[in-house]
Every structure is written in structure tokens, then in C-alpha cells.
Image: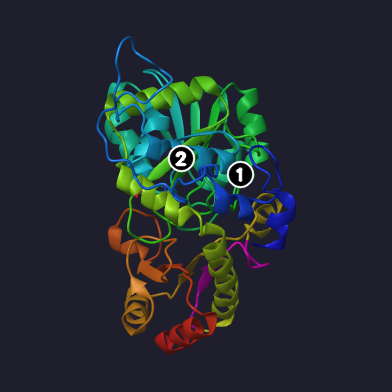
Amino acid sequence: MLEKQDSDTTSNTSSSATSLGTKVVHAGVNKAQQGSPFMQGPTFASTFHLSGEVDNDHHQYARFHNPTWDALEQGLGELEQGKAIIFPSGMAAGAAVMTALVEAGDTILLQSDGYYATRAYAETFLQKFGVTILAVPTLEIPNQDFSKIKLAFIETPSNPLLDVINIQELAEKIHAAGCLLAIDNTTLTPLGQQPLLLGADISMCSDTKALNGHSDVVFGHVATQREDLFDAMQLWRKLSGNIPGPMETWLVHRGLASLDMRLERMVNNAQVVAEYLEKHSKVKMIRYPGLKSDPSHEVACQQMHHFGFIISFDLGEKENADQFLQNAQMIFEATSFGGMHTMAERRARWGTDDVSAGLIRLSIGCERVGDLLLDIEQALS
Ligand SMILES: Cc1ncc(COP(=O)(O)O)c(C=O)c1O
């Protein structure tokens, strides 16, 4: 996709594909075999033939493993440059990280301005078993004392205000203190940022968003290069039964193949729309890491392969934001991001984020940018 990505993320871990943009098309696809289907369909099976002693080289029971998971996990592992485990949602993936890797008496560091459900899960279900939750604003995280923290679980760019943390610098500090670093990479996907290569122990993603990209599946994954962490999170999935269905898994794998192509359109569109909004008199504040004036721009240039497709902008009053959303013809009002269709919402309507009443989170889709600009122009006027 973007030139920077094609040159910067070249690797040769698994296939002869040279850039991530090419790898994503081939990720987890079966080797060519005479007469076999070009694309494998989902395997609907709860159990597998298993005679004699337990045979760990073959499928046994579908809560442990199944062929449809194997193909997607293989593909995601290639992209993340680690070993991947898939889950039925981004929250299940995040819960695996937080539940499998900490014990009573440990402290987890989270963002106070990150995705609220991650905090809510930890505060509701982990705190009562003796885990301490420390929630800190994104930009204050690098200055924390990590010596008493077991796991830092950080979203960068943060959602919805798009602050960016330098992952490499944070990983060095965190590892020096003996703490683990997990990065929620949902807003960028492995094509936009590679947390494991930047030093994080775990990369986590809600694949409900851009990775699947078609707004029809809820899904998630984690990836790591550490066998001990992999084993712990995989065991949590097996014993808690937090497993994705084969149909959803197959749909995500199908969506994955077009990720680079979709992102190219979305990210290029987002840059044009952000530059337009930045100059508009009705826009009181705008955040997009691709804008040179944005506080995240410098770090984004260092570690991100693209600037993403989310723009947050403030229209001042609640009424102005509601009017914009009502006027827009092409922009769907919905609470998600990363899909083919441009969507937006007034984030404060949930009461879960500390954002102003007029803040709109806009997720730019794959429409033609000229049409989007016309719609935005008329909705603002
Ligand atoms: C940054 C981030 N992480 C995690 C999640 C949770 O993902 P899911 O809705 O797939 O459970 C979301 C959902 O919006 C998110 O925005």
C-alpha cells in the first residue's frame, strides 16, 4: 500500500512474498495441491476421528483446535511475526491477555482514555480476585514507575483521541522493570504497525474492525513470540471455551485478503478529509496523526506504516454534532470503525469516554473521496 510500508516491512519469515501488502493476500492460504479447492471452505465439525491413544499431531476436539482456525492463525502469525491465537471478539482476546497472564496481587496498567470496555472488564472481573487496576492518561504512561506493575496493556493510537505512544521506548522501560507490554493494535491492524517487532510482548487486535473490514463479524486475535505467554493464553481459550465459530473464522480470513487494498483507499481518503476538516471554520478541534500539526504526527511517522482511517473532530455543541450526523447522506451513524462504509458517531452519547459533547469519531471508508467531501461539505453547511 503506502510506499513506506512496502519498503519498511519487508521480511522473509514464511513465504517468498516480500511486503506485508503482498503477504496479506496469501496469508494462511493452502499450498497448491492438484485437484484440491483453491480456497478451503470452513470445516463444520465438533469432533474428529481419534482412535487409540491421544494423538497430539491431529485434530481431536473443536474447542482445542480445528482446521479453519489453523489456516487463519497461520496467516495472522505470518503478518504479526509471532504465533497467533484467535478469539470470538476483541474483548475475548483482551480478556485472555489480562486474565491468563496475571495473578492475585499483581497490578495491570491501563489507559484512562482508551477503549472503556477493556477497563470495565478489568475493574469488574479482575479486581474482585485481588488484581489492582491502575488507569493512567495515555500521555502520562511513559513517565510511570513500572516496578510494581505486572502488565501494561496499551492502545496506540488511543481511541477516540488518537494519542500515540512510542512503543519501542516504552518496551525498553517496561522490560527493564520486569513488566510485560501488550499493545492493542485495533486502530491500525498488523499492516499499520507491528508491535512485536517494536518490542512488545503481545500484539492484540479487535478484528471486528478493519482487519475483517466488512462489518459482519465480531472477532479478535493475539500474537506473541514468547512460548510461555502463547501457552497461557491458548490454555485460557481452551478451558474458558472462548472460541470462535468456523464460519466467522472463515469470513475473517476472507476479509483479511483485501486488507491492504481497503486500507490504501481508506487511509488516502482520511488524509484528504482531515486536511479539509482542519481548514473548516466550524471545526473547533481535529485529531488525525497524518496531519503535520497533530501532536501524534512525529511519533506516528517513526512507528506507523500508515496514519489510519479514524479522524476525531469537535463541532463544539452537541446540537452541531447531531445536526452533522443527521445531514450526512453517505455517512452511517454507527458505533464501530474500520469498515468499507464511512461511519461516524458522537462519542459522548455513551457517557463512557471523557470527551466533549460535540466530538465526532469519523471512520473513513472505501467510497470515492470526492463524493465523501461533497457529503461532508453539505452536512457541515
Ligand atoms: C481499541 C479497541 N479494542 C478492543 C475492542 C473490543 O473489540 P470487540 O468489539 O471486537 O470485542 C474495541 C471495540 O470497539 C476497540 O475499539
Residue assigned mark 2: 71
Residue type, label 1: Gln
Residue drawn at x 39%, y 70% as measured from the top left: 343
Q: Quadrant of residue 351?
A: bottom left
Is 301 located above or below residue 311 in the figure?
above
Residue assigned mark 1: 194
Q: Is 315 placed left or right of 129 in the picture? A: right
Q: Residues within 10 Å of mark 2 (few under 14, many from 20)?
A: many
52, 75: nearer the viewer: 52
- Mark in front: 2 vs 1: 2
Disc 1 within 8 angstroms of ligand 1 (CB):
no
Residue 182 location (% of width, % of height): 51, 35
Q: Is residue 89 magenta?
A: no
Residue drawn at x 56%, y 73% as measured from the top left: 269
Camera sees residue 319: yes
User: Mark 1: which secondary structure?
Assistant: loop
User: Mark 1 or mark 2, which is nearer the start of the sequence?
Assistant: 2
Magenta-highlighted residues: 282-294
Residue drawn at x 62%, y 26% as measured from the top left: 175
Structural distance between the alpha carbons of marks 2 and 1: 20 Å
Residue 373 location (% of width, % of height): 50, 83
Q: Residue furthest right?
A: 7
Q: Main secondary structure of the magenta part?
A: loop
**Which part of the image, by quadrant, shows the N terminus?**
bottom right
Q: Is 43 placed left or right of 23 in the picture? A: left
Q: Residue furthest left?
A: 46
User: Mark 2: which secondary structure?
Assistant: helix
Residue 320 location (% of width, % of height): 36, 79
